[in-house]
Amino acid sequence: MSSVAGRLRLGGRRGLTDRSREERRLGWMLCAPAVIAMLLVTAYPIGYAIVLSVQHIDLRFPDQGGWVGLNNYKAVLTSSLWWTDVFNTVFITVVSVAIELSIGMALALVMHRAIFGRGLVRTSVLIPYGIVTVVAAFAWFFAFDASSGFVNHLPIVPDDEAWFGQRWTAIAVIIAVEVWKTTPFMALLLLAGLTTIDEGLYEAAKVDGANAVQRFFRITLPLMKPAILVALLFRTLDAFRIFDSIFIMTRGAQNTESVSILGYNQIISRTNLGLGSAVSVLIFIAVLMIAFAFVRLLGVRMAEGRPGT
Amino acid sequence: MRRGTREYATWSLGMILVLIFALLPVVWIISLSLKSPKTVGDGRFLPAGGEWTLQNYKVLFQGGFDNSPFIHPLINSIAIALISTLIAIVLAAFAAYAIARLSFPGKTIILGGALAIAMFPAISTIGPLFDMWRSIGLYDTYPGLIIPYLTFSLPLAIYTLVAFYREIPWDLEQAAQVDGATPFQAFRRVILPLAAPGTFTAAILVFIFCWNDFLFAITLTSSNNARTVPAALAFFTGSSQFTQPTGNIAAAAVIVTIPIIIFVLFFQRRIVAGLTAGAVKG
């Protein structure tokens, strides 16, 4: 009885019971390790990146150091390479996410209307999701490569097409890998959204004489709008960070570089930490702007989102 | 309800298209890994009859631990992914239990922060990490990769586990104690069996995430000490300087795909549930 009385007694400050104060402390204690681990490699490094980005730090010339203010940013923002890379990244992001949404929606509708073999279809679409991106990039690279590939031996394709020798054909293959790898995830998210729609709505619409196309645009799409927007936000940010497949297929040759490849080249290949960090910070700002635009302009409710990749 | 033949035909066609879309590149890389140096450039989708060879696989394992280009990275990949998964799941399970079951202020901030980290561009951290790891001796070591993997897989783990733990009827624990079970018995016999499937699912997703990483693996390693398979693949050279490593890369690619195929075949239902749990509020 005494413990019940203890729980009921309002304990001192802020009118908290002993029990709820204990619960708070336990909650924070249980979350602390995860929170620290998450901040360790994000908050601190981004702060450090900002510090590096206003210095002249080139590991090849360790003696020439010093604060240079915003000069690194000026150097990046006035170089045509940066803007070519921004264009490539935005182009690849917009095109691949648009294709993914269309194919993903079709896939979700096919899976939703499964008559048989639902397990087989779900198993097979999970393979592109799970496969290592580098492996996917190699598979597509070798398929299109003139010396080992089968694509140039297909009917209608010219036998000597050098896919990775020109900018736009290379970008097309890069987009194809991106679409192949990530459409299944999009489809699964959309499928989860589809299953929450009340079947009765469709029956009612049928009775009222709505055809399949009308039912899709008047019922399915509006009800799935929140799920679609969240999926779009995550996929857009993910595609904007594209790195692995470009690194494997072209290493940025033929003007196919993305902003992440540029950052890597500056930091690791040229060991120019100052300039590279300026690129890193600019990418971080771009990601913030994209997220902000989605939340503000499109009204994405972040509470409905969740990380997937 | 009777289904029309036409509906079956449409569905079958749709299913075949999906299967081709999903599996064609996988079949291609397997086929490529079985071609010999003579047939690797023949442009056929499948190796011509009778010309299959396992030579590409043998080359990967020649020379033992020290000289093989593949064995050491493969061991690194497995060890780093397993250790990262284990730590991430333990940390995430604590946090997810607290978030799902306890009431304390700051819960929404933690969930929102995790979501923000899921959107964080990893490339923005490699410069500082490269610099920091070199000065404190974590460059080219296991912990040097495990730490960033923890950071970036925790959001996925926490969200998946919170979604699963919210479904658990926690009152059963008290009911068991009322029936005379000790707190430990109640946890082991009642809560553990309920929480284990979701926790296992989250572990699969985290493992796939760590197994897939390439950016940290090539920037924070410089040798086979800690280099994982995706990074090693990017630096593969042929068995002699005159042969292209195409077949060997394909064979290594097939080997690192095997765990993924096993997970997908055996746990398809769980992975789908894990990926979509909590994604859409029903």
Image: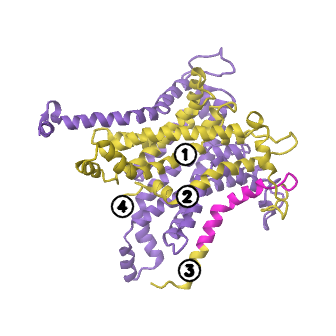
Host chain of mark 2? B
Q: Position of residue B155 (x, y in %)?
A: 45, 43
Report which residue position mark 4 lands on.
B282
Crowd tier of the residue under label 1, counting other residues whose Cα lies within 10 Å: few below 14, some 14–19, many 20 or above: many
Quarter of the view holding residue B110: top left
User: Is the residue at mark 2 from the same chain as the one at mark 4?
Assistant: yes
Q: Magenta residues: mostly which secondary structure?
A: helix
Measure the C-alpha gap from mark 2 to mark 3: 27 Å
* Three-letter amino acid code of the residue under disc 3: Tyr
Judge depth for marks 1 and 2 and give the one in front.
2
> Which residue corresponds to mark 3?
B8
What's the mark number on residue B266?
A: 2
Query: In this rendering, which labeled residue sits more in front, label 4 or label 1?
Result: 1
Q: Are marks 2 and 3 in contact (CB under 8 Å)?
A: no
Outermost residue toward the top?
A: A63
CB under 8 Å between discs 4 and 1: no
Task: Answer with mark 2 or mark 3, whichever residue precedes in sequence.
Answer: 3
Cα–Cα gap, marks 1 and 2: 15 Å
- The residue singled out by tag 1 in the image is B207
**Mark 2 surroundings: few (<14), some (14-19) or many (≥20) residues within 10 A:** few
Q: CA distance from mark 3 to mark 4?
A: 30 Å
Magenta-highlighted residues: B14-39
Residue A299 shown left or right of residue A92 in the figure: left
Chain B representation colour: yellow
- The tag earlier along the polypeptide, 3 or 1, is 3
Identify which residue, B188 or A84, lies in the foreground: B188
The alpha-carbon separation of the residues under discs 2 and 4 comes to: 27 Å
